[in-house]
Amino acid sequence: MLELTFLGHSGFLLSDRTQTLAIDPFLTGNPVAKRTADEVECGFLALTHGHEDHMGDAVGIAKANDANVIAAFEICNYFGEQGHENTNPGNPGGKIDTDFGWIAFTQAFHSSSFEGRYMGMPCGLVVHMGGKTVYHMGDTALFSDMALIGEIYQPDVALVPIGDRFTMGPELATRAAELVKPKIAVPIHYDTWPGLSQDAATFAPDGVEVRVMAAEDTLLA
Ligand code: NI
Ligand code: MN
C-alpha cells in the first residue's frame, strides 16, 4: 500500500507505513499549509526543482531528520554546502534504487533556481513505493512525451499542476493527464495564492478519476 498525504501547493508525504518520503515540502509562508516544518518526519526527501515554493523548508527538514535528499545534482551540492551530506543526486532520464523502491527523474519544462543561483534541470519525479507508482509532474508545461512517461511507468497516481501562469492551467493539465493515463489524478499547484486561483472542476481528463485534495487530506493508492 501507499498513502499520500497532501501538504498543500506541491508538497506531499508518501508512506508505505515503513518508509516516508517528503516531496517539495514548502510549509513556512505557505498560506494553505496546516502543519509546520518541525511536524514533518521522513527518512527521504525529494525535490522537483529549486524554487522557493518547493525547496521551502527542505534544508531544515532534511537536517532535523537526517533524511536522504534525492534531487538534481546542483541542488544536492547546495545541501552539501549547507552542511547536509546525506544526498542522492540525479538528473532527467536517471533512476535511483532506494530502500523504499525507486525514484526516476523525468523532464519538466520549467526553470530552477534558488537565491539567484542555478539549481540544475527542473524535474518530474516518478516514485515507486509500496507496490504503487506515483508521477509528480513538478512544475511543467505540457509536452507530448508525457504519453511515453505514462506508457513506461504506468503510474497509479499523477500529481498535476493546474495553477496556470508558471505551469499548465486546467485546460492543458487535462490534456496532460489524458496523455499519462494514470488511474487517479490529483490537481496541485493552484489556489495557494490569488494569482494561482483555479476552479479544480475544470480539470476533467477523460478516463481518469480526479481527486481534489486539501492540505492534510490523504489518499490510499
Ligand atoms: Ni517552480
Ligand atoms: Mn512552483
Image (cartoon, grey):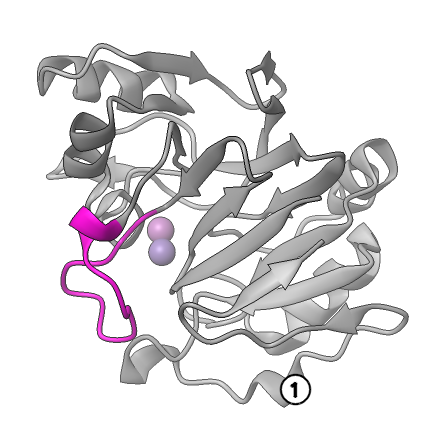
| Secondary structure category for the residue under label 1 | helix
| Residue beneath the point at 39% across and 36% down | 47
Nearer to the camera, 51 or 158 = 158
Residue 77: x and y in percent read 23, 14
- The quadrant holding residue 200 is bottom right
Image height of 83 relative to 67, above or below: above
Residue 160: x and y in percent read 59, 60
Residue 144: x and y in percent read 76, 47
Q: Could you tell me if residue 118 is visible in this image?
A: no
Asked if the stretch drawn in magenta spans residue 168, the answer is: no
Residue 159: x and y in percent read 60, 56
Q: Could you tell me if residue 127 is visible in this image?
A: yes
Q: Is the residue at mark 1 in contact range of ligand 2, meaning its CB lies under 8 Å from it?
A: no
- Does residue 42 appear left or right of residue 103 in this picture? left
- Does residue 41 appear left or right of residue 163 in this picture? left
Q: Say which amino acid is labelled 1.
A: Thr
Q: Residues within 10 Å of mark 1 (few under 14, many from 20)?
A: few
Image height of 219 relative to 52, above or below: below
| Residue beneath the point at 70% across and 64% down | 185
- Does residue 125 appear left or right of residue 206 in this picture? left
Q: Main secondary structure of the magenta part?
A: loop
| Residue beneath the point at 52% across and 44% down | 14
- Does residue 54 appear left or right of residue 133 in this picture? left
The residue stretch that appears in magenta: 25-39
- Residue at which label 1 appears: 202
